Amino acid sequence: MITHNQIKLIKSLNEKKNREEQQLFVVEGKKMVDELIQSDFDVEQIYHTQEYDINHPKAIKIAKKDLERISFLSSNCDVLALVKAKTKSSKIVENTIVLALDSINDPGNLGTILRTADWFGVKQIICSKNTVDVYNPKVIQASMGSIFRVDIAYVDLETALKNYKGKIYGAYLDGKNIYKESLNSGVLLIGSESHGISKSLEKYVTNKVTIPKYGKAESLNAAIATAIVLSEFKRN
């Protein structure tokens, strides 16, 4: 059984201010909850219907109609978990590839970037404070479980880059061809979908790189650009 107050709490977590206040977020769907259980995140509660077979100390079976009331998904879902948010380290890890995201506003893009980082073995992402919240339900769904394997922290990006001693690669339209560059460990800075890398951060970029253009498209989606550049990092 689920109470009125529990329903009210869960529905409130669709808003960032409530997630921050409660330090809780929502994970939905069998695949996502299966991944959650295998991770080191702390589960507050799991609500599921009889269609989802689970043996977990925090699991509560509820009616299908009650799960539909608390779900943020447009399609039918048989399980929803309430999860405690984690505080991630903002110190940039040395001698590896770290992603830095500047003003990424689209939840789908951030979720896809998380999934891409996970694919290429990138363990740390640092974000400007105006980047979309990683615990946004749309980000979580788009990450396809990668949110549980990649550390993501929100920082004063200018301060973080200023204090970093290694190479900082910035993705630009007018940078050097990435296929002709020697890419190794460092920070890869990706700018917003509409404005690119902020002017205030440009002075910290040591290596401007670009994906060469062969057609007439004006620009690449931020998540796709991230995938292409990370692939080239790994190839090198």
Image (cartoon, rainbow, N blue to C red):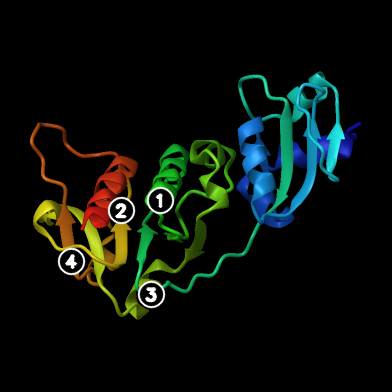
Q: Mark 3 = which residue?
A: 94
Residue at image position (78%, 29%) is 53
**Image depth: mark 3 or mark 4 in front:** 3
Secondary element at tag 2 = loop
Rendered location of residue 187, percent (x, y): 32, 65
State which quarter of the image contains the N terminus: top right
Question: Which of disc 2 and disc 3 is earlier in sequence?
Answer: 3
- Most foreground residue, 44 or 24: 44
Q: Mark 2 = which residue?
A: 191
Please indicate whether residue 108 sits to the left or right of residue 7 in the image.
left
**Image depth: mark 2 or mark 4 in front:** 4
Secondary element at tag 4 = strand
- Looking at numbered disc 2 in the image, what kind of residue is underneath it? Gly
Residue at mark 1 to residue at mark 3: CA–CA distance? 17 Å
Please indicate whether residue 145 sits to the left or right of residue 160 in the image.
right
In the rendered image of this protein, does residue 95 appear above or below residue 219? Answer: below
Q: Mark 4 = which residue?
A: 207
Q: Mark 1 = which residue?
A: 117
